[in-house]
Image (cartoon, rainbow, N blue to C red):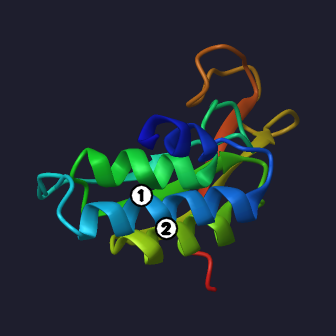
Amino acid sequence: MKDKIIQELNSSNKRSRLFGLEKIYKSIEIGEEQFKKTEEVNNHVHTIYSFSPYSPSMAAYLAWKAGLQAVGIMDHDSVSGCKEIMEACKIIGIASTVGFELRVNFSGTIVEGRKLNNPDSKNTGYIAIHGIPE
């Protein structure tokens, strides 16, 4: 039963994902299972809005299960998952941060022809924008 609900966290429907997370949280709150908390955070997580197979709700669930204090979304060129991860983290009681990575072409600049922070291509760099207000 619980495995089916966990799979629902990757549903194509955002409301279903959040509802599933709420059901999981309530079952754990009653004492079915507890996740050990750590002092760790991960503020650079990708979701289905980038290249990860996980929805924002699933990413929040996995962060919570791993004992993280906070999880932050950093999809490439997209802020589509930001609201969902904030809602999901609110449900499970962990902190969230939101941002995105922007690919920038540096052709025609003084760094043209160099590999910057993208080892696969010259002239392209990733710029991280983090801390988007609600």
Q: Which residue is mark 2?
A: 22
Q: Amino acid at mark 1?
A: Ile
65 or 44, which lies in front? 65
Q: Residue at x 46, y 40 (%)?
A: 1
Amino acid on which the number 2 mark rests in the picture: Glu
Residue placed furthest toward the bottom: 134
x and y percentages locating residue 8 in the rendered image: 62, 44
Q: Nearer the viewer, residue 121 or 23?
A: 23
Choose between 13 and 111: the one closer to the eye: 13
- What percent of the width, then of the height, locates residue 18? 61, 64
User: Which image quadrant for residue 24?
Assistant: bottom left
Q: Residue placed at 16% from the left, 55% from the top?
A: 34
The residue drawn where x is 59% and y is 29% is 116
Q: Label 1's element?
A: helix
Answer left or right for 119 relative to 29: right
Q: Residue 95 at what x, y percent from top left?
A: 36, 73
All told, the count of numbered labels is 2
Q: Is residue 111 visible?
A: no
Element class at badge 2: helix
Residue in view at x 78 percent, y 60 percent: 80
Q: Which residue is mark 1?
A: 24
Numbered circle sitting on residue 13:
none
- The answer to whether residue 133 is above or below residue 83 is below
Q: Is residue 72 left or right of residue 74?
A: left
Q: Position of residue 31 (x, y in %)?
A: 17, 63
The 10 Å Cα crowd at callout 2, few under 14, some 14 to 19, many 20 or more, is: some
Few, some or many residues within 10 Å of mark 1 (<14, 14–19, 20+): many
